[in-house]
Amino acid sequence: MDITYTAEEQAFRAEVRRFLDEKLPRDVSAKVRQGKRLTRDDHLRWHAALAERGWLAVHWPTQYGGTGWGPVQRHIFDEECAAAGAPQIIPFGVSMVAPVIIRFGTEEQKRHYLPRILDGIDWWCQGYSEPGAGSDLASLKTRAVRDGDHYVVNGQKTWTTLGQHANMIFCLVRTDPAAKMQEGISFLLIDMATPGVTVRPIITLDGEHEVNEVFFDDVRVPAGNLVGQENKGWTCAKYLLTYERTGIAGVGMAKAALRHLKTVAARQIAQGRPLIEDPQVRRQIAEVEIDLMALEMTNLRVIAAVQGGGVPGAESSILKVRGTEIRQAITDLLRRAVGPYALPFPQDALEAGGAAAEPVGPDHAAPLSAQYFNRRKLSIYGGSNEIQKNIIAKMILGL
């Protein structure tokens, strides 16, 4: 079942395609399509192109620089960007901390931080998870003690995505250790250049430096960097997570990956014929495509429901669970489609411009193993899928 678009929506799609054709850097889209690693500059160039067009902050109110788009326009934009090989917009500033600042921040915080996010001056990262507080986030132990006009922060955050590029981090910190778990937590904005902040890389199974540990040793943070009320940061945290979980669904990226799967299956030859002609393979592809169509409809309903400026509720957990399962299923089918060619993933084949190693098998096979391992994290971060199912059971099913 295809979505029927109005003439106005079709015109908007054509406008988005023209923009992508003119402004999306060719070298960046080529890296995305080939599964190569993107540099900080690659992300910033795309960020700048979107900001110049006014198409960066799709979730923001128009008075702060948002697009004012409806749910179908947002859907079309995401779909076309993924199809064109555009990088994912780094979400931590635009889609995560900005909505919190807009909802809970002071006017001074809005005037200072929101333009810097649009301009790309500040690259944000997220300080939520800790070694002993992942899905059980409320058990976090990073402390912030008020000392005059500052908070003194001590503790550790982990799995900090792209923290090596960031100059700002938004953190959940415990300001009242005697309070109940969800209480006594505050939301702080911290400059990464502050003395006492240390970033250490975590190299993942695919050889990528994507995540980090961040340590805070007597880090002095101005009290004006508190968002919302002291000890009420859990409200900010929940508000932010609904935006994160909705974005993790990745419908546009899943549709692009599904098209790539069909292309790979058509190219691969098994027993003298294209793999896509195998009945079992066709059934597997059809099943994941049906699931993706259902997810797309649900995603549109959720976006439409909050069009008036609200925030997604427990429905975001449904999107997170199904979206991550579908994206993992597609990468698994891609890996299986190329068989033993998916086993090696030489590091230089994944770096920008890297082609030192002799390619093993078809070109499209090189990144598939690394992508498969990397996508395993989708069902864990943003709150594990097991936690999301508990939320669905309690908040939607009333169990």
Image: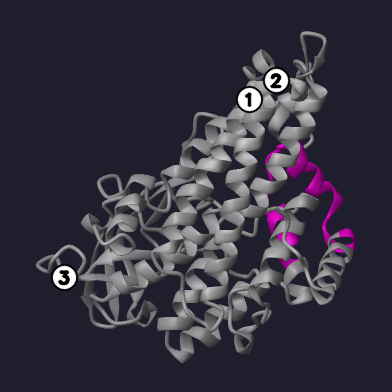
**Residue 66 placement (x, y as % from top left):** 64, 80
Disc 1 packing (10 Å; few <14; some 14–19; many ≥20)? many
- In the image, which is nearer the foreground, mark 1 or mark 3? 1
The C terminus - image quarter: bottom left
The amino acid type of the residue labelled 1 equals Arg
Q: Are marks 3 and 2 in contact (CB under 8 Å)?
A: no
Residue drawn at x 62%, y 44% is 290
The amino acid type of the residue labelled 3 equals Asp
**Residue 58 placement (x, y as % from top left):** 64, 73
Marks 3 and 2, Cα distance to the nearest angstrom? 54 Å
- Left/right of residue 160 with respect to residue 27 in the rendered view: left
The image's mark for residue 176 is: 3
Q: Are marks 2 and 1 in contact (CB under 8 Å)?
A: yes
Q: Main secondary structure of the magenta part?
A: helix
The reply to whether residue 383 is visible in this rendering is yes
Residue drawn at x 82%, y 9% is 272
In the picture of the structure, the residue carrying the numbered disc 1 is 335
